[in-house]
Amino acid sequence: MRTFIQRLAVTEPQLSPLILRIVFAIVLWPHGAQKLLGFFGGYGFTPTMHHLTTDAGLPSPIAFLVIFLEFFGSLFIVFGLFTRLVAIAQIILFIGMIVTAHLEFGFFMNWFGAQKGEGFEYHLLAIGLLVSLIITGAGKASLDVVITKKDPAL
């Protein structure tokens, strides 16, 4: 009989989800590294927490989860560990980004510097990618495959 974790992690060894996972992590992890570590011109954890709690008005636990999900969530996705669960959390994160910071600027990104902020088209692409991972699971070369193969009855 499958455990809850095994049911959550079940996936087929397909190539497409692997590609989606890699692309997602390549795009999101640097944003998390900016916020947590100060890499890529970011400010690091303490100034980012200050910005998210003071300027953006997020409660401290939510601000912490934003940083945690961007950095560690993208690593969980790339390694294919609890992919569906993390993808759901990431979708909530991206919806939060849209509602709190990008909706007021409309759909389009600020390609030509004509608006004061960025639209939410990038966020919709990420959400679509994450929905695909929820449907397919992690696919090939994932830790989810390892988790589901522990039980010979699977």
Image (spheres, helix red, strand yellow):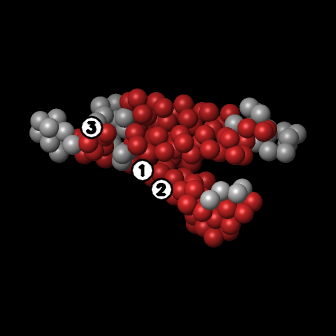
Mark 3 or mark 1: which comes first in sequence? 3
Does dot 1 land on a helix, a strand or a loop?
helix
- Mark 2 to mark 3 CA distance (whole Å): 22 Å
In the image, 112: left or right of 137?
right
Residue 7 tag number:
3
Q: Residues within 10 Å of mark 3 (few under 14, many from 20)?
A: some
Viewer can see residue 114: yes
| Label pair 2/1, CB-CB below 8 angstroms | yes
Residue depicted at x 62% and y 59%: 59
Query: Depth check: 125 or 2 in front?
Result: 2
What is the residue that sits farthest to the right in this orientation? 114
Give the spatial CA distance, label 3 vs label 1: 17 Å
Q: Is residue 152 left or right of residue 60?
A: left
Residue 95, by quadrant, is top right
In front of the other: label 2 or label 3?
3
Q: Residue furthest bottom?
A: 46
The residue at the point 75 percent across, 60 percent down is: 55
10 Å neighbourhood of mark 2: few (<14), some, or many (≥20)?
some
Residue denoted by label 1: 76
Residue located beneath label 2 in the image: 72
Please determine whether, in this image, residue 44 is positioned above or below residue 27: below
What amino acid is found at the position of numbered circle 2 in the picture? Answer: Phe
Q: Pick whichever, 134 or 40, lies toward us.
A: 134
Q: Amino acid at mark 3?
A: Arg
Q: Could you tell me which residue is drawn at 62 percent across and 33 percent down?
A: 124
Determine the residue positioned at 53% across, 56% down: 65
x%, y% of residue 4? 26, 42
Q: Amino acid at mark 1?
A: Phe
- The vertical placement of 39 against 70, above or below, is below
